Amino acid sequence: MKDPASPSTPIVSALPVNVFKGFLLAATGLLLFACMDSTTKYLTAHYNVPTVVAMRYIVHCVLMLVILAPRHSATLIKTQRTGLTILRAVVLTLASLFIGLALQRMPLAETTAINFLAPTLIALFASSLLGEQIGGLGWAAVITGFIGVLLIARPGSGLDAWGIVFALGAAAANAAYQVLSRLLASTEKAITLLFYTALVGTIVFGLALPFFWENKIPSSTEVILFFSMGAFGGLGHYLFTLAYRHAPASVLAPMTYLQLLWAGLLGWIVFDAVPDSYGILGMVIIAASGLLIAIKSRIARADSQ
């Protein structure tokens, strides 16, 4: 049985298209991702990053076991390419660590924007690993994306240098994670891949937790925030996947940049941080580079049909 969340599944094409509903589901999912990053940033001001990330993965894994394991236990663990599935999960743990370290040092909006360089990096990775042609439009997107990052991370921006390095590391790890997702999409189910990311993250950061635990008892508010990170991440992925049942990928792909808006709003409301004009311009340019990648992919699909 094919995964109902996969765009290639026949049942998806049979579903009635409701673009507005798909838009609302995707927008809500992206808001939850921004909420997760905001919570991570807040908690990393009081706890070290490995502890915060460990709590996120542990909660995510426990929720999947409690909610899904009773009915989908075999689906959760059965995989045809276990090595690549685990590698994909390990790469995501690196991305989570890097993004946490970046959020600890930089504003939410700027960190999110640099991490959105990932689609541009995917174009480079896909060329060398998947044999896909970049083409003129692809190279324009790559160059545009890096110009956007330079505007955000320019000298005099006041951003922490190590924070920029960690944000770029998160973007690179996120790009590798998405390339591996593309490689595994034809053989693995979405729910299986999601469970392995939660499981591997729990094991890696759970084993590291005793070495980083600061012998500090969280307050009741902090306990709620720790729990909310895993809930935000899991529910966000679920809603965004559900959006593909109501709207085509070509419509939803450009929408991922709505997370930049959510990150900017939450950064302003929660942390009273507003990017300067050059930073905002850099974010717009990075979003434009990602849209160029989406347009290129759509043209390539049209030519292959």
Image: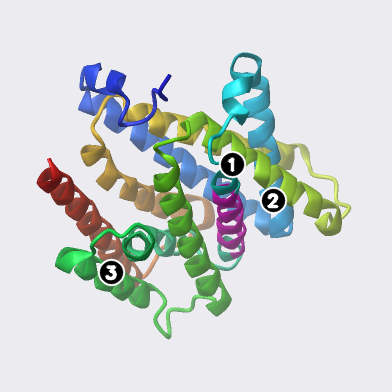
- Chief SS of the magenta region: helix
Residue 181, position as x, y percentages in the image:
44, 46
Which of pointers 2 and 1 indicates the residue nearer the eye? 1
Q: Disc 1 vs disc 3: Cβ atoms closer than 8 Å?
A: no
- Bin the neighbour count of mark 1 within 10 Å (Cα to Cα): few under 14, some 14-19, many 20 and up: some
- Rendered image quadrant of residue 160: bottom right
- Is tag 1's residue or tag 3's residue first in the polypeptide sequence? 1
Give me the disc on residue 82.
1
Give me the disc on residue 142.
3
- Bin the neighbour count of mark 2 within 10 Å (Cα to Cα): few under 14, some 14-19, many 20 and up: many
Q: Could you tell me which residue is drawn at 85 percent across and 51 percent down? A: 216
Query: Image height check: is 40 above or below 223?
Result: below
- Is tag 2's residue or tag 1's residue first in the polypeptide sequence? 2
Residues at marks 3 and 2, CA–CA distance in whole angstroms: 33 Å
- Is tag 3's residue or tag 2's residue first in the polypeptide sequence? 2
Give me the disc on residue 52.
2
Q: Disc 3 vs disc 2: Cβ atoms closer than 8 Å?
A: no
Within the magenta stretch, is there residue 98? yes
Residue 237, position as x, y percentages in the image:
47, 35
Q: Could you tell me which residue is drawn at 60 percent across and 14 percent down? A: 71
Query: Image height check: is 232 above or below 38?
Result: above
Residue 214, position as x, y percentages in the image:
85, 56
Identify which residue, 159 or 183, lies in the foreground: 183
